[in-house]
Image (spheres, helix red, strand yellow):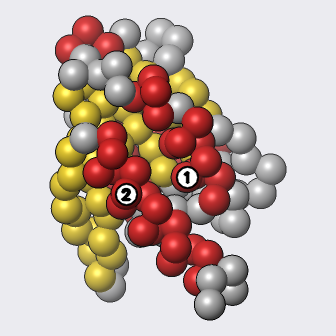
Amino acid sequence: MKKVVIVPDEEQISNSEVKNYSLDLDYHVKAYQKFSDDNNLDFEFTEDESHLAALLIAGLGHFNYKTEEEMGLLIFYLPEIITNRQLTYFQEHKNEYENYKQIGAYLIRKMDDDIFTDEVYGVNDIEREMIKRNKIFKEEKGHVR
């Protein structure tokens, strides 16, 4: 079974819910395409663009991850800024994530119109990175002095 979860940036997409796509998902990219279509993002992904789709969605500020249940694989895509809701979602589901054998994350960095990535592995290191990226969000909102 494959699963994709997208936690939208609530600052950009109002009234948006966390989207959990797992039923009849033979390609991860189908979930990203549905999210794009539902939110008028105007992407047209092909079946072999799962990684690119996840990066582009995260590049817009939407935290997401995908799983390959049979392989015990969990891959996160972290936007440059993590909102409070995104961090809370991660922390509420942290125990579930620890059940996977292989856990990694792509950390999005944008320069001009280009997207670059760094990688981090393990639930605790991913959580630390999310907390750092959430501090940027709080600073922009004036919550941290």
Taking depth in this image into account, of 44 and 73 the one nearest to the observer is 73
Q: Position of residue 91 (x, y in %)?
A: 53, 42
Q: Secondary structure at mark 2?
A: helix
Q: Position of residue 73 (x, y in %)?
A: 25, 24
Taking depth in this image into account, of 46 and 74 the one nearest to the observer is 74
Q: On the rendered structure, is 16 left or right of 67?
A: right
Q: Which residue position holds label 1? A: 87
Q: On the rendered structure, is 131 left or right of 19?
A: left
Q: Secondary structure at mark 1?
A: helix
Q: Which residue position holds label 2? A: 128
Tell me how many marks there are: 2
Q: Hey, what amino acid is under mark 1?
A: Leu
Q: Is residue 141 visible?
A: no
Residue positioned 33% across, 40% down in the render: 123
Q: Position of residue 64 (x, y in %)?
A: 45, 44
Taking depth in this image into account, of 91 and 62 the one nearest to the observer is 91
Q: Is residue 98 visible?
A: yes
Rendered view: 62 above or below 44: below
Residue positioned 48% across, 51% down in the render: 63
Residue positioned 29% across, 51% down in the render: 125
Q: Quadrant of residue 14?
A: bottom right
Badge 2 density bin: few <14, some 14–19, many ≥20, Cα 10 Å: few
Q: Earlier in the sequence, mark 1 or mark 2?
A: 1
Which quadrant is home to the C terminus? bottom right
Badge 1 density bin: few <14, some 14–19, many ≥20, Cα 10 Å: some
